[in-house]
Image (cartoon, rainbow, N blue to C red):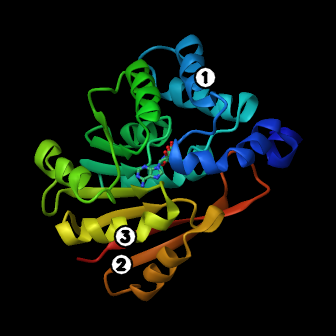
Amino acid sequence: MSLKQRIPLLRWSFLRMALGVRNISTTGQIGDGREAAVLDWVVANARRGDIDDVIAKIDQFAYEKSFLINVGDEKGALLDAAVQRVDARQVLELGTYCGYGALRIARAAPAARVYSVELAEANAAVARGIWEHAGVADRITCVVGTLGDGGSTIDALSTEHGFAAGTLDVLFLDHDKNAYLSDLQGILDRGWLHKGSIVVADNVRIPGAPKYREYMRQQQGVLFDTVEHKTHAEYQTLLADLVLESEYLG
Ligand SMILES: C[S@@+](CC[C@H](N)C(=O)[O-])C[C@H]1O[C@@H](n2cnc3c(N)ncnc32)[C@H](O)[C@@H]1O
């Protein structure tokens, strides 16, 4: 890894992302077209139908071309391990972005149906294009919406996509950090988790989800058993981050 790749502040695409950070909560994109560009890059450079190559080419784009807010390779390995640990059949990701996290989940759990909720239609279109190129579009579904929209998205997951009591093996929280706790609560209220289900939460240190972290501390040994993984923010090694892996105790 080059110095530029290790220290994100030396990269223009990282500084440009800091300028566009406010866009992410409204449009879901940084504002310079990098999300559409990664789809073009994958189609032009990754072997069609080869999920490993597609993931590798997205990582290459993020390291060498333009920084992306994917879970990334280092934290992605923690996500892979969590998904494999429960032999997941149904997985829900909140926050699709360009579809990278869902691809990793689909690779780690070949028998799973993966659902990913994303607020921005434009990101859903990029992700679907990437999944199609990787040959896994039949196993990953993007649902455009948010769980905080008053009930229509969470209702759609149950009426159209088969979410029901005890069906959800892995929940991956990687969207609006202020919504981690309320969205988890909405899922708990529906009873979708079962004993042994895993909840993985990214970015608990950067940008940070303090209320969620506190909740998991309070629930330690009660509703959840949580391991805090010390790691780095995506695609660099300067900034520390935390990924929380919480087993539901039922
Ligand atoms: C950090 S990115 C997700 C990265 C993705 N999980 C991956 O690893 O490839 C966050 C995404 O969450 C979306 N988002 C933000 N708030 C959301 C919400 N309340 N519900 C669903 N998606 C949301 C943003 O549009 C953005 O695409």
Rendered location of residue 113, percent (x, y)? 25, 41
Judge by depth and name the residue closer to the eye, 210 or 60: 210
Label 1 Cα neighbours within 10 Å, binned few <14 / some 14-19 / many ≥20: some
Does the CB distance between marks 1 and 2 fall below 8 Å? no
> Mark 3 belongs to which amino acid?
Ser
According to the picture, the residue beneath numbered tag 3 turns out to be 182
Rendered view: 23 above or below 57 = below
Q: Does the Cβ of the disc 2 residue fall within 8 Å of ligand 1?
A: no
Q: Element at badge 1?
A: helix
**Looking at the image, is mark 2 or mark 3 nearer the viewer?**
3
Judge by depth and name the residue closer to the eye, 159 or 91: 159
In this view of the protein, can residue 224 be seen by the observer?
Answer: yes
> Mark 2 belongs to which amino acid?
Phe
According to the picture, the residue beneath numbered tag 1 turns out to be 37
Report the quarter where the C terminus lies: bottom left
Does the CB distance between marks 3 and 1 fall below 8 Å? no
Report the quarter where the N terminus lies: top right
Rendered location of residue 189, percent (x, y)? 21, 71
Q: CA distance from mark 2 to mark 3?
A: 16 Å
**Residue appearing at x 39%, y 27% in the figure:** 128
Judge by depth and name the residue closer to the eye, 61 or 142: 142
Drawn side of residue 59 relative to residue 106, left or right: right
Instruction: Tell me which label, 1 or 2, sits earlier in the chain.
Output: 1
Q: Element at badge 3?
A: helix
Drawn side of residue 57 relative to residue 250, left or right: right
Drawn side of residue 187 relative to residue 218, left or right: left
Instruction: Tell me which label, 3 or 1, sits earlier in the chain.
Output: 1
According to the picture, the residue beneath numbered tag 2 turns out to be 224
Rendered location of residue 155, percent (x, y)? 17, 53
Does the CB distance between marks 2 and 3 fall below 8 Å? no
Rendered view: 102 above or below 219 = above
> Mark 1 belongs to which amino acid?
Ala
